Image (cartoon, grey):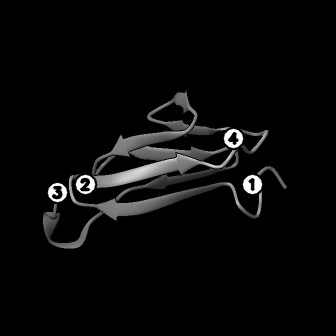
Amino acid sequence: PQVAPQHATVTQESGGFVLRDLGSPAGTFVNGHRVSGAVWVRPGDAIALGHAVELVLHVPGGQR
């Protein structure tokens, strides 16, 4: 219930990966810090959607 249907996106771009917070009231966090808008994320970063779901960015083969 804390995660919105359209909470955030992660896309691969030429320089790496971009996390976009889509304005959910519960918030989006990277490594414990609340973010808004678009931020760069790296493999190993912990992405939390609200306080209920935590994901860790993992890229097969160690791609950067």
Q: Can you say which quadrant of the picture contains the N terminus?
A: bottom right
* Mark 4 touches mark 1? (CB < 8 Å): no
**Whole-Å distance between the Cαs marked 1 and 2?**
25 Å
| Front position among marks 2 and 4 | 2
Give whichever of discs 2 and 3 has the lower sequence position: 2
Residue at the (52%, 49%) spot, across then down:
20
Decide if residue 14 is on the left or right side of residue 49: left
User: Mark 1: which secondary structure?
Assistant: loop
- At label 1, the amino acid type is Val
- At label 2, the amino acid type is Gly
- At label 4, the amino acid type is His
User: Mark 3: which secondary structure?
Assistant: loop
Q: Which residue is mark 3?
A: 64
* Rendering coords of residue 40 (x, y %): 35, 43
Decide if residue 40 is on the left or right side of residue 62: right
Give whichever of discs 1 and 3 has the lower sequence position: 1
Query: On residue 51, which mark appears?
Result: 4
**Whole-Å distance between the Cαs marked 2 and 4?**
26 Å
Residue at the (70%, 48%) spot, across then down:
52
- Residue 12's quadrant in the figure? bottom left
Q: Which residue is mark 2?
A: 16
* Mark 2 touches mark 4? (CB < 8 Å): no
Q: Residue furthest front?
A: 14
